[in-house]
Amino acid sequence: MLHIGHGYDVHAFAEGRRLILGGVDIPYARGLAGHSDADVLAHALMDALLGAMRADDIGQLFPDNDPAYEGADSLVLLSRVAELARSRGYRICDCDCTVAAQAPKLAPHRQAMRQNLADAMGVPVSAVGVKATTTEHLGFVGRKEGIAAWAVALLEEV
């Protein structure tokens, strides 16, 4: 049987932080606020995987009031979610992600993001899509206040 999950996450920009998306350290004046490394892309993907498993969300699995996750590498957390899926009898078939950011330009980093996410989940890079878009200057993303990400994941019971 196939199971699909959807994930969404958003983080505001913050001064004095690195901008990490899909495990890629992207040169930019500001990073994203968060308890972990605030990798909004990895967070959306984790929630998509957890949704497909009908499991808790990342806030319950990796609470932001737990000091153990302060500054955590989201790719490590993604790897743990992928391992949870395997331990529950699922195979990760396919994932697709969209990042909305007015700035910076993300196209030059897409392939590295895909590879990092695939490596963290233990799947071929062909099973991970990453797209980037702007919001045509509309909303909080368009005003360059933060970044949003959506993801879907398809799991198969094995």
Image (tube, grey):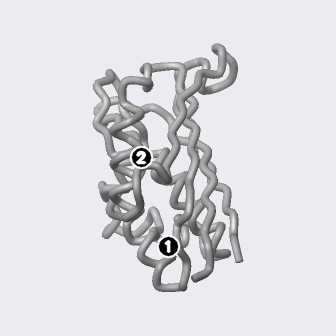
The residue closer to the viewer here, 134 or 57, is 134
Q: Secondary structure at mark 2?
A: loop
Q: Which mark is residue 61?
A: 1
Q: Report x, y in % for residue 19.
A: 35, 35
Q: Earlier in the sequence, mark 1 or mark 2?
A: 2
Does residue 134 sit above or below 48 in this rendering?
Answer: above
The residue closer to the viewer here, 70 or 73, is 73
Circle 1 residues within 10 Å: few <14, some 14–19, many ≥20: few
Q: CA distance from mark 1 to mark 2?
A: 16 Å
Q: How many marks?
A: 2
Q: Residue furthest top?
A: 137
Does residue 36 sit above or below 50 in this rendering?
Answer: above
- Give the residue type at disc 2: Asp
In the picture, the quarter occupied by the C terminus is bottom right
Q: Residue at x 62, y 73 (%)?
A: 156
Q: Report x, y in % for residue 10.
A: 57, 42
Does residue 59 sit above or below 152 in this rendering?
Answer: below
The residue closer to the viewer here, 22 or 119, is 119
Q: Which mark is residue 100?
A: none
In the picture, the quarter occupied by the N terminus is bottom right
Q: Would you name the residue on which mark 2 appears? A: 39
Does residue 36 sit above or below 18 in this rendering?
Answer: below
- Residue 2 occupies quadrant: bottom right
Q: Residue at x 44, y 20 (%)?
A: 105
Badges 1 and 2: C-beta atoms under 8 Å apart? no
The residue closer to the viewer here, 14 or 112, is 112
Q: Residue at x 49, y 49 (%)?
A: 128
Q: Secondary structure at mark 1?
A: helix
Q: Residue at x 53, y 85 (%)?
A: 88
Q: Report x, y in % for residue 119.
A: 33, 57
Q: Report x, y in % for residue 109.
A: 36, 30
- Give the residue type at disc 1: Leu
